[in-house]
Each structure stands twice: as structure tokens, then as C-alpha cells.
Amino acid sequence: MPKLTDQTDEEILSLLETGQIKQYTLDRELEPLRAVQIRQQFLLSDYPDHIIDTIPYKHYSNYETATKSCCENVIGYVPVPLGLAGPLLINGSEYNVPIATTEGALVASLSRGCRAVRESGGIDSTQTYFGMTRAPLIKFSCGRAAKQAADWILEPGNFEKIRAQFESTSRFAKLKSINPKQAGKLLFLRVVAATGDAMGMNMISKGCEKMLQFLQTVDVFENMTVLSISGNYCVDKKPSAMNWINNRGYSISCDVTLKCDVIKSVLKTSAGALAELNSSKNHVGSSLAGCIGGNNAHASNIVAGIYLATGQDIAQAGTSSMAMVNMECLDRGDLYVSVTMPCIEVGTVGGGTSLAAQQNNLQLLTSAPDVNINAALLAQVVCGAVLAGEISLLSALCSGDLVKSHMQLNRAER
Ligand code: ADP
């Protein structure tokens, strides 16, 4: 068959239609935009023009990267509005917060929260933990054999042997611990590692694979079967008490003391009203609903907006959004507010962060272009922005403004 580059679009379409080539051949052999164009014609030819015309595919500078590492069968891209909230003052530095969203009022509300934080002196933020996790699942002939294997793992000298193997797979992967959990003859090994500025799922999976190869050479593991590199005890992309209690990714604590006059002038409410609503809604209401990690009003709005804008794995937005909001009335009408988030799964290298717009949004975060936004800093911005988003939404609820502003900003006349 002649090279695809020497053939016309019609000839290539006919090869696709007759099954002589696969869709992925387009990406391998053609220049990226032409591959996307031909795929659109191949897959969408039965749809009316007005539908196809609304799926943009031109003027995208990243097909090369996108088709190699982010998406297959690419037919274009989906434009999502991008807003900039802030500046958000955390630990003495200001950050612009890029939010990709289709929820009207969100960016405006977040900006109001940022203003209240700024005028109260800013957020104090601390990182309390980092460890990405993966939990391979292995099977033995019986429970006793699984227990012997778990005991072997927990011997300190053996951990060091595993560490050497694990860390040989990447200069950034640093093994922190392995927590075995047994269920009969099944053994789940929750592996915890630092992964530099990568969110770390690929990196840690590579390390786990090497670990399993090594374990197969050890007596007590000789008869194990590896059922899966992930046994759901990680826990990745599923709601869980595990990550709420034991952390995953970055665990961040942010707090601020909102000044009485700022609560009145910017947030149009009072410390007492905010504290009462936080307790009744975010604690009592969420408990009655059986939420795990749901002691907040809308953390996932902020997390999803930042994740989309900065190329994070958007499938982790739900689990990363677990957050506890606490409020305490202080003297003179001030209000102490804290947000604790134990499971912020972010990176500034790898995955979607390698796409130009997403990488540039990471740069936009800081108003000082020479400051490097690394993953730890991004996690702090996520948590700080959640705090700002919480105080603004809860204030709108206190003052009865929520429906009014949503009707104004979501239902604007077209
Ligand atoms: P993930 O592990 O988050 O799924 P990747 O598989 O893309 O993401 O891994 C990150 C890649 O980026 C690795 O190849 C790693 O060597 C490289 N890298 C470059 N700089 C860094 C850094 N500062 N921290 C972590 N990884 C880095």
C-alpha cells in the first residue's frame, strides 16, 4: 500500500471504510491536523452540518501531544469558558485562580471570597502530608500464606529491599510505606510514595510493577498470583473513607480570621450567621446525608474548575474535593475559618499539564512570572480557593442572595 501521505483524503476515507487501515494509523502517519480532519469526515459524515460545525478542530496547537498522550480518536476539542478569580492571598503571595466552568456566578462568587480573604490579611496555609498511593492486589493459596507474605513486607530490612527496586524506576519516585490489608487469601498492598511534581499515578504504577517482579523472587511470594496492579485499596477515583482518614496526594490545611467589618461590607452577613449555617449545613446536614468528606458547601465547584483549567486528571476532581470547613466566632465579631483537605491529587508535570493552554494557566496562577508553580504550591492554591469559595457561597446563603445572583448570572438574556 502506498504511504498515506501520498494519498488523497478520499482515498484514505475509502481505506478506513473498507477496514484496510485503522483510525490510529491516521495519527501515526499523517500530520496531526489532517488526521483529525479526515477522522471527522469518517466518523461524522452522517450528522447534519450544523452539528459538525460546532465542534471546533482548527487552531489547536497541541494535537501532537494530545494524540500521543492525552486522547485517542481525536475529532476536535470542546471549548470551555475560562475565568480568572482572585487575586487570592496565601502565605503572603497573591495568586490568580484560573477556573474553567460553565457554572455562571462561580467565578464572581469566588472573586468575592478572595477579596474578603485579602482584606482580612490573607490565608495561612500548611501542607501536612504528601503521598500518592497505588494498591496492587495479589492472591495466595490460603489465608495463612497471605499473612506470611504481609509479615515479610512489614519487616524493616525487607522494606529497604523493596524500596531499592521501586525507586530504580524513576529519579522522582520515593517509596514511603507499604500498608498490607488482607481479606482471606487476597492481599492488598497500599503503596505510598512521593512522586515529585507529578500527580504520580503512572510513576507509582511503574514502581509497583517492579516491586511485584522482585517479590516473585522471594520464597513466601513464590506461589502468588498478581490479580491486578490496582486492587481499589489505593483508592483512586472512587469515594472512600480510606483517603479521608489516611490521606492521598496532598493534605492541606488553610485558615484565615475574617474581620468583622469585612464580613459586613464584602460578604453582607455576620460571623454568627456564617458559623451557625456552617455548623447546621456542613456538619449536621452532611452527617444526616451520610457524606464522607462532604463537610463543605461546594468544594468540588472550585476543584473541578481549577483541574479543568490546569490539566489535572478531571476524574479525580470528586475525590480531591473532600473538605472539612470549620468556623468559630471570635471576639469583636471576627470569624475564624479553616478548610482541611486530605486528598488533593495534583501535578504540574505529566498528563494534561503538558498541553499548552493548561501549562500556561499554571503560569497564570502567579502574578510573579519568575515564581515556579510546583505541585505542592498548586495544592495550597486549590485548598485556599476552596476556602474563599466556601465563605462566599455560605454568605450568599445567609443573606438570601444565592438564587437572585444565580438568576442574574445563569439566566442572562441572550
Ligand atoms: P504521572 O505519574 O503523574 O501519571 P507521568 O507518567 O507523565 O505522570 O510522569 C511524570 C514524568 O515527568 C516522568 O517521566 C518524570 O520523570 C518527569 N518529570 C520531570 N520533572 C519532574 C518533576 N519535577 N517531578 C516529577 N516528575 C518529573
Image: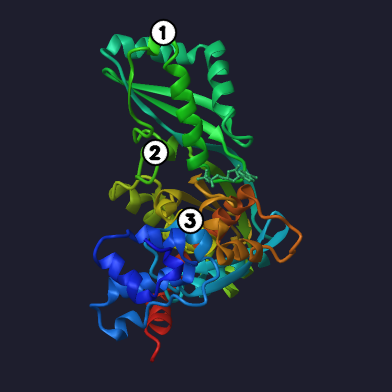
Q: Quadrant of the C terminus?
A: bottom left
Say if disc 3 is inside 8 Å of ligand 1: no
Instruction: Tell me where residue 11 appears, x and y as whole percent.
Output: 33, 72
One can see residue 398 in this view: no
User: Observer-nearest residue: 295 or 346?
Assistant: 346
* Measured Cα–Cα span from mark 1 to mark 3: 41 Å
Say if disc 2 is inside 8 Å of ligand 1: no
One can see residue 217 in this view: yes
Disc 3 packing (10 Å; few <14; some 14–19; many ≥20): few
The residue that disc 3 covers is: 68
* Amino acid type assigned to the residue bearing label 2 in the image: Val
User: Observer-nearest residue: 189 or 352?
Assistant: 352
User: Observer-nearest residue: 79 or 261?
Assistant: 79
Residue 190 in the image: above or below residue 147: below
* Amino acid type assigned to the residue bearing label 3 in the image: Lys
Instruction: Tell me where residue 66 appears, x and y as whole percent.
Output: 49, 60
The circle drawn on residue 219 is 1
- Nearest to the eye among marks 1 and 2: give it: 1
The residue that disc 2 covers is: 235
Q: Earlier in the sequence, mark 1 or mark 3?
A: 3
User: Observer-nearest residue: 145 or 210?
Assistant: 210
The residue at the point 52 percent across, 47 percent down is 340
Q: Quadrant of the N terminus?
A: bottom left
* Measured Cα–Cα span from mark 2 to mark 3: 27 Å
Disc 1 packing (10 Å; few <14; some 14–19; many ≥20): few
Regarding ligand 1, which quadrant of the image does it lie in? top right
Disc 2 packing (10 Å; few <14; some 14–19; many ≥20): many
Q: Earlier in the sequence, mark 2 or mark 3?
A: 3
